[in-house]
Amino acid sequence: MEVCSDRNKAYMCTLHICVYTSHHTLRLDRLRKRSHIQAHTPSLSFPYQQPACIATNADSLPVGGEGRCLHGDRARQRVPAKLKTTKAAGSQQPLVSGSLCLRSLLIENHRIFCVTAPASSQVTMSVPPPLKISGSNPASNTRRMRRIIAEDPEWSLTIVPMLSELCLRHIVSNFENNPILTQLNPSQQRKVLDRLSTDLPLKVVANLITDESYWRRRCNQRWTVGHVEKYGNSWKRMFFERYLQDLLKLVIPGTTDPNVILEMIPLCQDYVVRLCVDQFLPPVKLEQQMQEMDQSDSASETELEELNMDHYQLGDLVAGLRRLEELDLVYGVKDCGMNFEWNLFLFTTRDCHSLASAIKACHTLKVFKLTRSKVDDEKARILIRSLLDHPALMELDLSHNNIGDRGARAAAKLINHSHLRILNLANNKIRAAGAQALAHALSYNTTLLSLNLRLNCIEDEGGQALAHALQNNATLTNLHLGSNELSEPTATLFSQVLSVNTTLTCINLSCNHIGLDGGKQLLEGMSDNKTLMEFDLRMSEIGQESEYLIGVALNVNREAARLRTLQSNCCHVTVSHIINNAAG
């Protein structure tokens, strides 16, 4: 560096630079510098800009002066700095400016105040007192912010979280080990619930969290499709019902730990209302046991079929679900592929007895469905016997099974020994004898509203028995006799039912052999009927003319019913308006 005076002397000095930060004071010891003193020249100018991270004192280095911030290897370069001539306190020697050769310097988030050197052999240093923090928000002064924390542009006092926010974050992160929710106020609970993970164990959140938005997040994470309206518009009920159903579908007797299901009972007992399981896996076959049964001469064919085929027993689970109202079961295997065997769809005798005990003990059960499970007469009688005089049962569905006349007679007995309203025995093996038993029960019944016997074979003998019963019955509204080998004699009796019965609103005689004459008989009966709304005669060979005229009569009945409904509503509104005016 070129100096403009003859009175230059070199001095080696050790400077102690006091570095003030917002938290602590750092001393950089033994910083060696070579100072070139100029007595007459007040200052030296260099084409460098003072870094924003270095703040200077007004008496030594002006803000915005010249210099450069050093980082890494650049710290070893010669960096001139502009110093202003001052006088040290208590001394007559002027303080002069010069250049500094810094061998190593790394400044991050610190504040350097003042560096001065006298002309004498002694080195003095002036350090101003720390700045007083004003009561205003430091973040409002952008220049001060730059001077304090310019090295970390992402840090700001404006984003420092409040203590309450830090506490909520800790509650969320530690919720599994220490669940805290009810002690918080509503706004804090909302923040915690919105941040909670959907992977928390059910034993932690099942009986603690009732918020629907949280359970909605869990449902959407687990299942891509979900119709919450089928679950009473409750996401929590939907989650526990579907979660329990998924567990039951994968239980393998003898392999799966039973505690997996039993541990769920305390968690979901207040939320499961409907349990629909369309798969029960059989136990794993053991080749050794199969060989022993094959070698045994005393083993019957039934024992061979039901060897180790008993499914998971629902007794303990159903007894623990105290709000259970609907039980829909299918004993079979889905997606078995090349492993198909008829035994996979076997509803064993032990399964039947266990299920009968379970539904008998469940006094809240209103709907019981057991379909596509190869239920025969004997098993149907066992199940129906357990439902006699049931306090809550309203619907029984045993469709798509192998039930015959004996099972139909058991169902006929149940009609008059329960509060049953819907009975579905479609697609079974019921014949005339079973239909006659049901007809006899209908003659005295006052609760049953719907009877479905489609896809059976009751023929005219069974159809005529039912027609005679309907002339006396005053409660049944829906009757389905489609595909039952019915013909003209049955149609003749049903024409009499149409002119007498005033409660039936829906009759299905489709896929039978009614014939042209039978169609005319039914049309004659419709001329006197004012209540029937639906009459399905498709593929019954009654002729287009009769089918058209019957349809016209049905439209007249529907229009009359609509007018009666409107008149009833208008009367109700008028009466309410009169009452409100009188009260006013």
Image (cartoon, grey):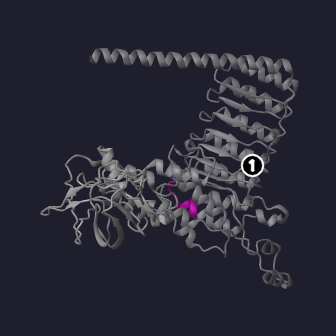
Q: Residue 31: image x %, image y %? A: 35, 71
Residue 252 is a magenta residue: no
In-image side of 447 versus 54 (left or right): right
Q: Residue at x 70, y 68 (%)?
A: 349
505 versus 377 height, above or below: above
Magenta extent? 358-364
Q: Quadrant of residue 481?
A: top right
Q: Which residue is mark 1?
A: 434
Q: Quadrant of the C terminus?
A: top left
Q: Quadrant of residue 275?
A: bottom right
Few, some or many C-alpha atoms within 10 Å of disc 1 (few <14, some 14-19, many ≥20)?
many
Left or right of 373? Residue 576 is left
Q: Residue at x 45, y 60 (%)?
A: 205
The residue positioned farthest toward the front in the image shown: 6
Q: Position of residue 151 (x, y in %)?
A: 41, 56
Q: Amino acid at mark 1?
A: Gly
Judging depth in this view, the residue of 333 and 513 nearest the camera is 333
Percent across and percent down for residue 106 are 41, 65
* 575 vs 343, nearest the viewer: 343
Q: Position of residue 193 (x, y in %)?
A: 42, 53
Residue 470 left/right relative to 516: left
**Quadrant containing the N terminus in the rendered view:** bottom left
Tell which of 61 and 509 is nearer to you. 61
Nearest to the observer: residue 395 or residue 101? 101
